Amino acid sequence: MKLSYFHVADDVPSDLIAETAVVIDVLRATTTIACALNNGAEAVQTFSDLGKLKKDSSNWPASSKLLLGERGGKKIEGFDLGNSPIDVVPELVKGKRLFMSTTNGTRALERVKNSKALYTMALINRRAVAEKLIIENFSDVLILGSGWEGSYSLEDSLAAGSLASFLIEHGPDPVHIINDELNSALALWSYWKDNLLGCLHKSTHGQRLTAIGNHDEDFACCSELDKINVVPTQSDLGVIRSF
Ligand code: MLT
């Protein structure tokens, strides 16, 4: 299996259509997607553009949808929920379509939406996604971080390293690390793997979240490794379901 990692959406060559893509936004979009699907959401439909989200969601019955999203880490005015994984509880999300837009995570998803297979991953569902990649026997996997407004993020690289490390250890075939971004992510994983919470707090986006309010429960949730078994999978363009 060939594995490569790109820090942010704009690093992915514009003409590239990946065989398989895994999008990561540990703080917090892909953790929230994993938790929402694990708690019974019908699907999470993602948008980088807020106008399009409002238009598409308006065709959906009010009783079976929630609008969810943030800008700069803060809930979008008029939306039902922000982007906290601890808010997407079963009582709220079960059976509902979540229309979601976030500062960076949904932009990364948009960039690779034409991939033949597309998954989202965070630390909380790392093992489930890794096992899916192994079972499907994919030969070429592009891992894409979300970063922050075009720049590198520590926590997404940590999770990319955690995925590569699992595949190297448990995958049936040799894993070929294609770029130095992923070699660095593996080194980062070795360094922080026993202190995931510490790494999230150290990251610049972790510090941004701390500066705008108490996010202790979010940090605790986002730093859990292999806790849930969902494999968030794009089923239709922009629509992510659990399989
Ligand atoms: C994003 O998409 O940039 C993040 O998920 C931001 C956040 O922490 O809500």
Image: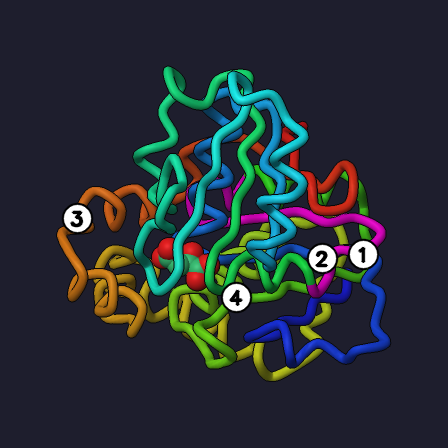
Q: Which mark is residue 90?
A: none
Is mark 3 in CB contact (under 8 Å) with mark 4? no
Mark 1 neighbour density, 10 Å: few (under 14) some (14–19) many (20 or more): some
Numbered mark located on residue 216 in the image: 3
Helix, strand or loop at label 4? It is loop
Residue bearing the label numbered 4: 146
Say which amino acid is labelled 4: Ser
Neighbourhood count class around disc 3 (C-alpha, 10 Å): few under 14, some 14–19, many 20 upward: few
User: Which amino acid, by three-letter code, is at mark 2?
Assistant: Ala
Residue 168 lies, in percent from the top left, at 61, 58
Residues at circles 2 and 3 in contact by the CB criterion of under 8 Å? no
Q: Which residues are magenta?
A: 111-127
**How far, Cα to Cα, is label 1 from label 4?**
16 Å
Q: Earlier in the sequence, mark 3 or mark 4?
A: 4
- Is 77 located above or below residue 90 in the figure? below
Sequence order check: which comes first, mark 1 or mark 2?
A: 2
Q: Amino acid at mark 1?
A: Ser
Q: Quadrant of the N terminus?
A: bottom right
Residue at the spot x=34%, y=48% of the render? 222
Beta carbon at label 4 within 8 Å of ligand 1: yes
Looking at marks 1 and 3 on the same chain, the residue that comes earlier in the sequence is marked by 1
Mark 2 sits on what residue?
21
Q: Which residue is mark 1?
A: 115
Pick the front one: 183 or 28: 28
Amino acid type of disc 3? Asp
